[in-house]
């Protein structure tokens, strides 16, 4: 097979995948029709862009930022001010393109702060971004004209100036606006990974010294990548502003920055589509869990710590690890061992959830002895027996996981040997 | 015509400790020059000074008659000097092909472009494919660098050093850690890919040195005690004493 | 209460002097508290290259543990036991967490401690609840040490200063006089050599991490009753401590001390001298109209800039002196 032929197949394959992505976005509101689903899916679109832009730093260029919400949030504020200007009839600009205002704002501040922070790499870079994030967040109290003080800035997204004649009042119209931008931004960011800048960002991530010895100034490469990442974060912020019609100081702050790091990492930084998984999953779990449990942040934290330790490639990394055995037809050898580990794992998780929920019941509930609905049971957090059972389940579960994990490892070792023996491509 | 590479009275001190103590060295264009010397003589430091990793404490380094000491590594690279590393230093998560293509990007003028798709740059990709072939790595095209065998990694290391088109090449122990057969293969490869280039190499393997080099300089305790043809170096009494005497 | 123009105009009067003296004292106090946190952080960083993002969370744990211990015994027992317990938790974190991700590099270690922030902060809510706990200053220290210009200076503040200075002295002696300290100092400048010399580097790492988090715990014991012990206390302290460490120079203990004091004083002054730039300009006779060119800027409140100043200072020092006040290495 010649390279030109294979590259044509690759091109068709790429177009097919992105078309499918767009199709899913178009079809989803026909399946999940409730207004809360529409709202949640709109948020997913916003956070997909945001997380992908974050991964331009962490995954692609090896830059760990604790201040990425600065560009997201400022983009949102700029967009909202622009919308207000259109409503006040001092400016004419179609709503569909408003996220570009956010993008330009994000880009501008990406250039300003990037020129300071990208001079350094690694842990120092991380701390500088934290400092800049804190600086911008605390400056919100000073620049009240721009940030709107405690109550933030709000506006009305229905501006009468549009390209396609929609009012963008109904949330479904906003959903499709966000969906269109999600596809465009995701494709753009994907294509960016295929440019010289994208390749050199990878090179700087893998080996900055070598990148210098093939002629690249690593600081400039990081800086451009950082600025462009700010652009896309700004677009996400602009869509966020259009969706919620309000921006407050915490939108530029550390909590928001931490959230995007969390979702990107959980999704997986090593593969382009990882952050998409992360954004969808974290947004879903946030919406689903925060109504159900006080402890959703704790669960997220535990999940994150677990992944840093045992699955640094995130969910996408775990999936991708199975691609080779799948192609080699060896996946069936792994699955039984997974089932084996699943049982004690579920027990451990159930035990943990019970302990955590009972803990919250004791410390937060008005009446701690009121029963908690958990696993289709009513559990009394003040009863010693509940605690004993839960802790026992947790302990037995963990012991079981430790024991059965050996089986999984042994199976993997076997599969790897078989693949090496048959010379299967990795 | 000026020397391809010229070092004049180069010193390097770390704190109070002098490592390089006044090195003068001239390498003519097209010459294959080897630096030998006992461990700790400062060979690696010298390479790091020439390639811009360190700045000399004193003295001057010139490439084709133009001063390069004090410049950053990427600036020196752009002026036509490239180096390999003693410890393999590749883009580990990238495939062999990607490694080679990355080393061609700047040389082909793409700079930091984010408006070209590398997959569609025919000249770039063909050049990278050609390098794959020259290095004998075509079969390993899509394997991540980290999964290559040691010898393959060394080959790719030399390939990425040379692919960018620099005309002065610094090789830091290119055959270190290799078996005899691999070594001969690598030697042949180096001779092939460095034709009409200026070559400066540090090497421990005397077989390699005396076979490949036009001239040899002997670095002992931060100073060059002799710089001559292989035959003359072999016969040089000071070298025998300083180098062989210490090595045996 | 907002001092008016007249306060400014009559600088040198007792009112102004009082403000300055108490700002200096409070600034020193805040600075020393910052230093108690920053010293552990910078030691851990210098020794291990690990930036402990959860450092302020260990500080909070110190306060809460002190609350619980002192509610069963008394403050003095808590002062000893709480830091030890927090240090023990730090040792566990290093042994069963950080050591496992060490092979993935410093960014992975930083990510792990970042995740721990969420876990620890939520566990605190889980165990102690969301509302502040009643961790009070011990009665034996709850008296006025002296009164100046009609304002009293509580003894507990002096005690905090005393403990912080004693701690600095103890760290200094530990580093300079003991063998462990020699190894740590050697590791600060030549990390790879220490391992080559046959020291059990992983165990030293555990000890250093435990020691550093223990210091954070001690800071929590001291600050928890001076401020308020509540679940947000880590979050309000965390970023500023990082600023101190960067400002002072990564891995430099002296730099951390200087930076802590500078930032402590600067923020305290900015908050206490509660006048706006507009007032200042008016006072020096420029009489700028609030609505003209300086419009947006003139309405900035200096008390608001107080929160932002440390971060601004960090950004500025990174521009003009990237290694910080006293940092030896770039990074």
Image (cartoon, rainbow, N blue to C red):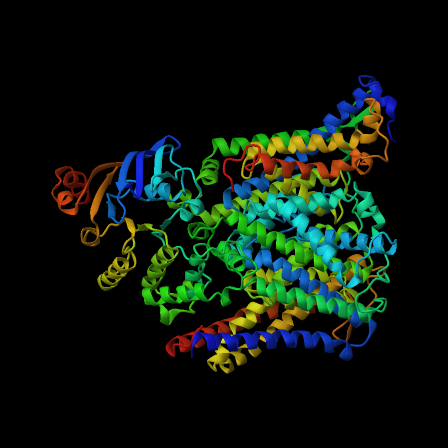
Q: Quadrant of the C terminus of chain B?
A: top left
Q: Is residue A386 left or right of residue C315?
A: right
Q: Position of residue A236 (x, y in %)?
A: 71, 60
Question: How many numbered marks, from 0 up?
Answer: 0
Q: Which is more toward the observer, A95 or B205?
A: A95
Q: Where is residue A307 in the image (x, y as percent from the top left)?
A: 59, 63
- What's the residue at 47%, 34% (across, down)? C178
- What's the residue at 56%, 66% (across, down)? A271
Kindly indicate the quadrant of the structure image that contains residue C138: top right
Q: In this view, does A246 lie to the left or right of B192?
A: right
Q: Quadrant of the N terminus of chain B?
A: top left
Kindly indicate the quadrant of the structure image that contains residue B147: bottom left
Q: Which is more toward the observer, A212 or A82?
A: A82
Q: Can residue A64 be seen in this view?
A: no
Q: Is residue B56 left or right of residue C221?
A: left
Kindly indicate the quadrant of the structure image that contains residue C300: top right
Q: Which is more toward the observer, A99 or C331?
A: A99
Residue projecting furthest to the front: B1
Q: Is residue B228 left or right of residue B98?
A: left
Q: Is residue A224 visible?
A: yes
Height in image: A176 above or below A52?
below
Q: Position of residue C313 (x, y in %)?
A: 66, 36
Q: Position of residue C232 (x, y in %)?
A: 74, 48
């Amino acid at each position: 097979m010649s390279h030109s032929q294979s590259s044509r197949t690759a091109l068709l394959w790429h177009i097919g995948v992105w078309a499918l992505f767009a199709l899913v976005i178009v079809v989803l509101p026909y399946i999940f029709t409730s207004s809360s689903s529409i709202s949640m899916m709109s948020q997913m679109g916003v956070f997909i862009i945001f997380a992908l832009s974050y991964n331009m730093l962490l995954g692609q260029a090896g830059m760990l930022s604790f201040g990425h919400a600065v560009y997201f949030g400022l983009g949102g504020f700029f967009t909202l001010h622009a919308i207000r200007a259109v409503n006040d009839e001092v400016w004419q600009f179609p709503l569909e393109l408003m996220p570009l205002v956010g993008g330009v704002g994000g880009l501008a501040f990406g250039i300003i702060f990037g020129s300071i922070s990208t001079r350094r790499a690694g842990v120092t870079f991380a701390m500088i971004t934290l400092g800049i994030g804190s600086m911008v967040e605390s400056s919100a109290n000073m620049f009240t004209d721009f940030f709107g003080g405690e109550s933030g800035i709000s506006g009305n997204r229905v501006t009468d100036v549009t390209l396609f004649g929609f009012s963008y009042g109904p949330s479904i119209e906003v959903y499709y606006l966000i969906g269109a931008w999600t596809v465009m931004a995701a494709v753009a960011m994907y294509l960016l990974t295929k440019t010289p800048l994208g390749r050199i960002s990878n090179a700087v991530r893998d080996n900055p010294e070598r990148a210098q010895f093939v002629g690249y100034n690593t600081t400039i490469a990081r800086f451009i990548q950082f600025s462009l990442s700010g652009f896309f974060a700004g677009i996400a912020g602009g869509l966020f502003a259009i969706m919620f019609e309000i921006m407050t100081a915490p939108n530029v702050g550390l909590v928001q920055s931490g959230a995007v790091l969390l979702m990107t990492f959980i999704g997986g930084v090593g593969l382009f589509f990882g952050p998409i998984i992360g954004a969808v999953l974290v947004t879903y779990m946030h919406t689903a869990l925060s109504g159900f449990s006080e402890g959703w942040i704790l669960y997220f934290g535990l999940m994150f710590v677990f992944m840093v330790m045992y699955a640094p490639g995130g969910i996408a990394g775990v999936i991708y690890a199975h691609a080779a055995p799948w192609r080699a037809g060896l996946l069936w050898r792994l699955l039984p061992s997974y089932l084996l580990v699943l049982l004690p794992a579920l027990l451990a998780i159930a035990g943990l959830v019970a302990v955590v929920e009972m803990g919250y019941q004791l410390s937060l509930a008005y009446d701690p002895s009121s029963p908690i609905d958990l696993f289709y049971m009513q559990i009394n957090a003040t009863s010693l027996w509940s605690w004993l059972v839960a802790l026992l389940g947790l302990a037995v579960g963990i012991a079981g996981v430790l024991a059965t994990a050996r089986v999984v490892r042994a199976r993997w070792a076997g599969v790897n040997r078989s693949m090496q023996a048959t010379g299967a491509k990795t | 015509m000026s020397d391809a590479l010229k070092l004049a009275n180069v010193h390097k001190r770390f704190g109070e400790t002098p490592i390089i103590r006044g090195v003068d060295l001239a390498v003519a264009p097209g010459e294959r020059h080897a630096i030998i010397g006992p461990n700790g003589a400062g060979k690696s430091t010298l390479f790091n000074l020439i390639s811009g990793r360190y700045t000399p404490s004193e003295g001057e380094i010139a490439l084709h008659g133009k001063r390069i000491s004090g410049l950053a590594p990427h600036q020196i690279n752009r002026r036509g000097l490239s180096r390999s590393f003693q410890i393999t230093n590749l883009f580990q998560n990238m495939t062999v092909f990607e490694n080679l293509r990355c080393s061609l990007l700047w040389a082909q003028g793409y700079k930091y472009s984010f408006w070209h798709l590398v997959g569609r740059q025919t000249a770039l990709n063909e050049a990278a494919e050609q390098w794959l072939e020259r290095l004998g790595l075509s079969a390993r095209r899509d394997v991540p660098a980290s999964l290559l065998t040691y010898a393959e990694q060394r080959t790719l290391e030399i390939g990425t050093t040379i692919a960018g088109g620099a005309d002065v090449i610094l090789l830091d122990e290119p055959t270190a850690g290799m078996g005899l057969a691999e070594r001969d293969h690598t030697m042949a490869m180096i001779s092939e890919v460095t034709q009409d280039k200026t070559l400066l190499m540090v090497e421990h393997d005397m077989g390699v040195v005396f076979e490949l080099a036009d001239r040899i300089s002997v670095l002992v305790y931060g100073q060059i005690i002799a710089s001559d043809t292989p035959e003359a170096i072999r016969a040089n009494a000071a070298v025998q004493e300083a180098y062989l005497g210490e090595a045996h | 209460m907002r001092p008016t123009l007249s306060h400014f105009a009559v600088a040198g009067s007792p009112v102004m002097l009082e403000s300055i003296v108490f700002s200096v004292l409070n600034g020193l106090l805040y600075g020393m508290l910052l230093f108690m946190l920053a010293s552990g952080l910078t030691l851990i960083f210098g020794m291990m290259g690990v930036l402990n993002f959860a450092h302020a969370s260990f500080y909070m744990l110190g306060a809460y543990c002190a609350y619980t211990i002192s509610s069963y015994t008394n403050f003095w027992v808590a002062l000893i036991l709480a830091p030890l317990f927090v240090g023990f938790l730090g040792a566990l974190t290093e042994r069963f967490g950080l050591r496992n991700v060490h092979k993935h590099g410093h960014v992975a270690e930083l990510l792990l401690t970042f995740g721990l922030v969420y876990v620890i902060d939520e566990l605190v809510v889980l165990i102690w609840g969301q509302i502040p706990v009643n961790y009070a200053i011990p009665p034996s220290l709850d008296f006025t040490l002296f009164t100046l210009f009609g304002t009293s200076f509580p003894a507990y503040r002096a005690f905090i200063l005393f403990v912080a200075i004693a701690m600095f002295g103890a760290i200094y002696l530990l580093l300079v006089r003991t063998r462990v300290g020699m190894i740590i100092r050697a590791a600060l400048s030549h990390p790879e050599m220490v391992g080559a010399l046959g020291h059990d580097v992983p165990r030293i790492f555990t000890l250093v991490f435990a020691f550093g988090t223990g210091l954070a715990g001690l800071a929590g014991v001291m600050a928890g009753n001076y401020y308020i012990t509540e679940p947000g206390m880590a979050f309000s302290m965390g970023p500023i401590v990082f600023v101190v460490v960067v400002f002072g120079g990564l891995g430099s203990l002296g730099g951390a001390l200087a930076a802590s004091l500078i930032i402590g004083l600067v923020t305290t002054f900015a908050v206490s001298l509660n006048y706006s730039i507009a007032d200042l300009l008016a006072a020096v006779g420029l009489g700028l109209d609030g609505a003209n060119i300086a419009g947006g800027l003139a309405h900035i409140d200096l008390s608001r800039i107080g929160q932002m100043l440390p971060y601004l200072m960090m950004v500025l020092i990174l521009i003009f002196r990237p290694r910080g006040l006293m940092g030896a290495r770039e990074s």
